Amino acid sequence: MYQVEIIHYEQPLPVLMKPHQGPYSGIAAAFAALRTLLQQHGTGPQAVRAFGQYLDDPAAVAPQALRAAACLTPPPALSLTPAEVEELGFVYGELAAGRYASIVHQGPYQGLAGGWNWLLQEWLPGSGEQFGQRPLLDEALNAPQDTPPALLRTRLLLPLA
């Protein structure tokens, strides 16, 4: 169904984060808040990478208690100090270095659960790999603002031990 690639991030990736609590499907509002922050306080070109970080297992945690973060790599020209960022409800953080099993899902974000289920329930048990104790990540490879839902591409990143 998917082709798995093992990716090794040598260094943690610095990001600007907007925490989100509630159903993972609601994380779009946190991404919108991040983009607004960059529009208001960034200067120059803003080529950034967008990641979702997912801290809880939706099979074990009630939807309203799920914790996640919308993350963008901060552009060099962001004109805010860490204290100003926190005052506005955002934080600077890092995405963990390490090995990840990666697949690319194409289609609407509503279909991402199918990709995660395949990685966790079908691929992982027979792979010889073990789940790493780091958050699940996804990376938007194109933007929903200018891409039809059927053509959205999202890299799912399953942490490995």
Image (cartoon, rainbow, N blue to C red):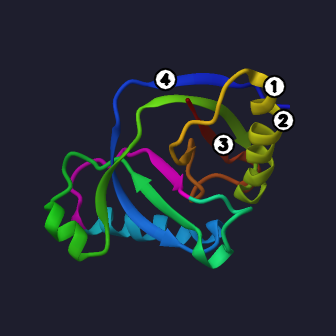
Report how far apart the C-alphas of labels 2 and 1 lie in the structure.
7 Å
Residue that carries the numbered disc 3 in the rendered image: 153
Residue that carries the numbered disc 2 in the rendered image: 122
Mark before the other along the chain sequence, 1 or 4: 4
- Amino acid type indicated by mark 2: Glu
- Relative to 105, is 100 above or below? above
For label 1, count other residues whose C-alpha is less than 10 Å away and answer few (under 14), some (14-19) or many (20+). few
Report how far apart the C-alphas of labels 4 and 3 lie in the structure.
20 Å
Badge 3 marks a residue whose secondary structure is strand
Q: What stretch is highlighted in magenta?
A: 41-55
Residue mark closest to the camera, 2 vs 3: 2
Residue mark closest to the camera, 4 vs 3: 4
Report how far apart the C-alphas of labels 1 and 3 lie in the structure.
25 Å
Report how far apart the C-alphas of labels 4 and 2 lie in the structure.
21 Å
Badge 1 marks a residue whose secondary structure is helix
Residue that carries the numbered disc 4 in the rendered image: 8
Looking at the image, the residue that sits furthest to the bottom is 64
- Amino acid type indicated by mark 1: Gly
Mark before the other along the chain sequence, 2 or 3: 2
